Each structure stands twice: as structure tokens, then as C-alpha cells.
Image (spheres, rainbow, N blue to C red):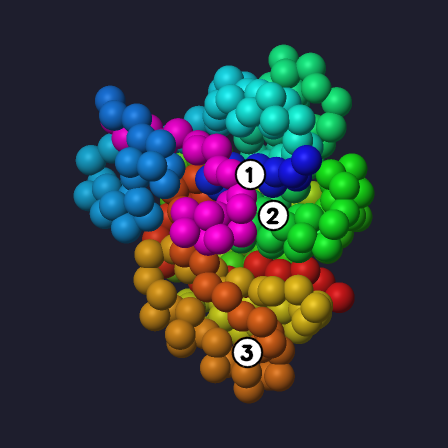
């Protein structure tokens, strides 16, 4: 009997890393105009940001259908294996609900579905933790319980370049986004209780970066887990930011890098930089 770890492409887990870890990926859909893409299958991150920059069409995202989860779950049942499924936050998407429906359709007991209440590398951290527990010999039920216990400590903080994409996605009103554009405010966002929220606004990137560092200091990183430096289209923003973390003595020991993919990139746009980690 094997234990399978399944997550969706909003985790921004690279296919090569998924293969190395033994994680199965279910793809989100991204719509540009009349054309639909599968995240990570026929739409890579660089291509997504190029399409976004072209500005011809505004993208939209769609959750996987229950049948997209059903296929791997039926394989689990056929093999007599167990599975832990970790999904994008239920506040941001119906992906969790699709996975639950697929579990019911499969009608097989040892399948456990976890609502990450997170996104991008936050989901990735939980998936990797689940793999670690699997490799330690824990059963699927125990893995799901431990992932549930730690997910409330996931923190994501980021500076984004504009409020426009949050407005397009319905996360901000037209008035809020318009004021941000006029005053050149740089928002600091976080994922809290599964939702993307604006936690601060500063005049200019330098001030916003200082505010981001303040949030990271107030919510210290648990060094027993990996932490991810996040960026959307431009990794140089991370390279400029990390020395500032080092100066403040808050640079993670196990530091990874994660380019934010189409699912979350649709809502925050280019020019983002931040951190995803587990708080002490």
C-alpha cells in the first residue's frame, strides 16, 4: 500500500519538483479571451506574464472540475492505496469543494482532503510537509491531521505593484483601486484565514518594502520548515529584497524560490515580491 499526495497547480510546485517528491498535480484552468489553458501543462509562467503584459485580454481562472480529481482518486482506489489531497484555499476557489465531490464520487474511505486556507508556496509547504510525513511512515489519516494542525501557521506577505489586478478580480472596489493608482500607493498584502487582504499601503516601493520587513519581523519564521521567497515575473526584485532581510537577521535558513503562477498571478499581477513560510 502506498500513500499518494495530491495537490493542485495553484501550489506553483514545479513539475520536476512534483516528480521528485512524488506529488500528483491537478491543473487549474486559465482563460485569456477565447482560449483556455491548463496551468503548467500548456501555459508556463513566463508565457502567462507575457500574455498579461500584452494586455489584449484580461485573464480569468477556473477551478478543476470534480472529474479532474476523480481520475487520480480512482487510481488510488484501484491500487488499494491511501491519499491526502491538499487544495487551494476554499475562500479563493471552489477547488476544495471539487475535491470533496470527487471523494464522494469515488466512495473510498482512506482519502483525506485538506483545505490549505493558503495559496501558491503556502500550499507547496504543506504538500512537502505531507511528503515528509509519508516518508516517515505515517498513515494518510495521521498525515492529514498533522497538516491540518500546522496550516494555521502559514504566513504569506507580499508587496504588489498595483491594485488594478485585485480590482479586476473583485478583491477591491473600483474606488479603492482608483485611489491607489492616483496616490501611487504600493499595497502590502497577506493571506489571512484563506483570503487575500490588503494589510498596508505605502508611498513608493522603498516604504512598502520597509513595511513588509516589519510584518516579517512581527511574525517570525519557524526555521524547522522551508521558507519561500516569492516573486511574480521579475526575480531581481527578490534578489534586491533578501539582503534587507539578512541585515535584520530574519533570513530563513532553508530558503527556496517560487515564481507565482497564473492562478494567483491573475489577481496580483507582475512586480510582486514577498515571503511564504510557517510562523514560529
Image coordinates of residue 249 in percent, x first then y, are: 62, 83
Q: Residue at x 55, y 78 (%)?
A: 245
Q: Which mark is residue 245?
A: 3
**Picture mark count:** 3
Q: Residue at x 48, y 48 (%)?
A: 18
Mark sitting earlier along the chain (2/1) = 1
Q: Secondary structure at mark 1?
A: strand
Q: Residue at x 52, y 59 (%)?
A: 158
Q: Is residue 245 shown in magenta?
A: no
Q: Which-is-in-front pick, marks 2 and 3? A: 2
Range of magenta residues: 11-33
Q: Is residue 32 shown in magenta?
A: yes
Which quadrant holds residue 54?
Answer: top left
Mark sitting earlier along the chain (1/3) = 1
Spatial CA span between label 2 and label 1: 7 Å
Circle 1 Cα neighbour tier, 10 Å, few/some/many (<14 / 14–19 / ≥20): many
Quadrant containing the C terminus is bottom right
Spatial CA span between label 2 and label 3: 26 Å
Residue underneath mark 2: 127
Image coordinates of residue 230 in percent, x first then y, are: 47, 60
When the figure is inspected, residue 31 is found, relative to residue 193, above or below; the finding is: above
Q: Secondary structure at mark 2?
A: helix
Quadrant containing the N terminus is top right
Circle 3 Cα neighbour tier, 10 Å, few/some/many (<14 / 14–19 / ≥20): some
Whether residue 14 is visible, yes or no, is: no
Depth check, front residue: 104 or 257: 104
Q: Which mark is residue 7?
A: 1
When the figure is inspected, residue 175 is found, relative to residue 250, above or below; the finding is: above
CB under 8 Å between discs 2 and 1 = yes
Amino acid at each position: 500500500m502506498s500513500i499518494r499526495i495530491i495537490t493542485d497547480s495553484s501550489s506553483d510546485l514545479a513539475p520536476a519538483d512534483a516528480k521528485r517528491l512524488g506529488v500528483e498535480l491537478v491543473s487549474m484552468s486559465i482563460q485569456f479571451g477565447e482560449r483556455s489553458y491548463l496551468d503548467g501543462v500548456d501555459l508556463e509562467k513566463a508565457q502567462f506574464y507575457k500574455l498579461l503584459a500584452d494586455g489584449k485580454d484580461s485573464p480569468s481562472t477556473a477551478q478543476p472540475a470534480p472529474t479532474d480529481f476523480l481520475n487520480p482518486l480512482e487510481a488510488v482506489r484501484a491500487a488499494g492505496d491511501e491519499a491526502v489531497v491538499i487544495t487551494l484555499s476554499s475562500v479563493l476557489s471552489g477547488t476544495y469543494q471539487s475535491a470533496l465531490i470527487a471523494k464522494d464520487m469515488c466512495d473510498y474511505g482512506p482519502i483525506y482532503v485538506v483545505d490549505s486556507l493558503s495559496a501558491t508556496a503556502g500550499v507547496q509547504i504543506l504538500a512537502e510537509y505531507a511528503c515528509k510525513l509519508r516518508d516517515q511512515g505515517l498513515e494518510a489519516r495521521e498525515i492529514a491531521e498533522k497538516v491540518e494542525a500546522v496550516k494555521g501557521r502559514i504566513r504569506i506577505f507580499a508587496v504588489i505593484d498595483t491594485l488594478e489586478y485585485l480590482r479586476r478580480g473583485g478583491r477591491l472596489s473600483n474606488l479603492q483601486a482608483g485611489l491607489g493608482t492616483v496616490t501611487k500607493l504600493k499595497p502590502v498584502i497577506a493571506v489571512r484565514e484563506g483570503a487575500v487582504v490588503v494589510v498596508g499601503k505605502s508611498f513608493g516601493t522603498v516604504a512598502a518594502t520597509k513595511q513588509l520587513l516589519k510584518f516579517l519581523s512581527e511574525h517570525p519564521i519557524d526555521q524547522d520548515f522551508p521558507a519561500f521567497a516569492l516573486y511574480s515575473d521579475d526575480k531581481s526584485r527578490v534578489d534586491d529584497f533578501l539582503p534587507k532581510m539578512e541585515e535584520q537577521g530574519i533570513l530563513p535558513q532553508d530558503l527556496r524560490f517560487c515564481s507565482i503562477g497564473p492562478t494567483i498571478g491573475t489577481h496580483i499581477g507582475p512586480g510582486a515580491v514577498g515571503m511564504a513560510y510557517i510562523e514560529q
